[in-house]
Amino acid sequence: MITLEPLKQWICDTCGELIAKTEDGWVEWTQDGSGRHSFRLVHHVSASPRAEPSRFHSGGCYGHSANRDHHLRTFLGELGMVKMLSLLDAGSLHMPEYRQQVADVRSWVDTFRRLFCPYYEEARQYFGRLTNGHDINSVHDYLGGANEVLTYEPQFLRDMCEHYRRLDG
C-alpha cells in the first residue's frame, strides 16, 4: 500500500500509482445522458505513467476529453470546496434550472472526501481489507461501534492507516 501525504498526494483511479504532486493530477468526470457527472482522480497526461511519449495527445491515465475536466489544483482549498459544492447544488441564489449536476452522489462524496478529508485517500486503500473476506462481526469489532461520522474523522482514518501499516510491517 502507498503511504500518502494527506491532501497533497492521491492515488490515480486508472493506474493505481501515486499522484505525487498537485500539478500531476487531473479531476476527470463523465456525463450521463442528462448531463450529470461522476468523478475520477487521474494523472494529468504530462505526468501519466501510461502516456506515450511519441504521441502528443496520448491520454495516458486520462480517459476521455471533455471541456469540463480540470487540473486537480482547481478543486483544492476553499475555492475547490465551493466548486465541488456547486456541482451538488448551485444554491438558492440561482434559478431553479441550475439543478444538481451530480449523477452519482456516492462518487461525488467519495471525491469530496478524497480532496478535503485528511487521511481519507490513504485509508480508502484499506477499506476492502476491512470488509472483504471478513465476517460482519470482525468489521464491527474493528470499527468498535463507530457511527457513520466517526469513521471519516481524520483521527480515525489516521489510526486505521497506522494499524494497517503495522500489520504490513
Image (spheres, helix red, strand yellow):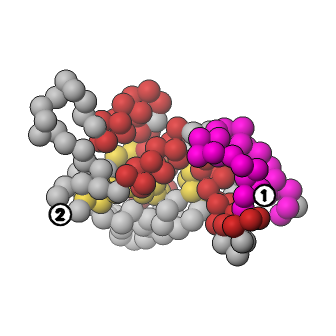
Specify whether residue 119 is in view.
no
Mark 2: few/some/many CA within 10 Å (<14, 14-19, 20+): few
The residue that label 2 is drawn on is 33
Instruction: Say what secondary structure mark 1 lies in.
Output: helix
Which quadrant holds the N terminus? bottom right
Instruction: Name the secondary structure under disc 2.
Output: loop
Residue located at (42% from left, 55% from top): 107
The percent coordinates of residue 9 (x first, y second) are 59, 46
Mark number, residue 141: 1
Magenta highlight range = 139-168
The kind of residue tagged 2 is Gly
| Residue 65 as seen in the image, left or right of residue 55 | left
Residue lying farthest to the top in this orientation: 93
- Check residue 144 for magenta coloring: yes
Q: Which residue is nearer to you in this view: 47 or 138?
A: 138
- Residue in view at x 40 percent, y 34 percent: 80
* Residue placed most toward the observer, 5 or 152: 152
Earlier in the chain: of badge 2 and badge 1, it is 2
Residue 131, quarter of picture? bottom right
Instruction: For residue 91, say whether it is visible.
Output: yes
Give the percent coordinates (x, y) of residue 36: 24, 54
Q: Is residue 61 located in the magenta-colored stretch of the structure?
A: no
Where residue 30 appears, as percent x and y from the top left, is 30, 60
Q: Look at discs 2 and 1 and give the one toward the viewer.
A: 1
Q: Residue pushed farthest bottom? A: 133
Label placed on residue 47: none
Residue 72 figure quarter: top left
What percent of the width, then of the height, locates residue 169?
A: 88, 61
Q: Is residue 100 above or below residue 96?
A: below
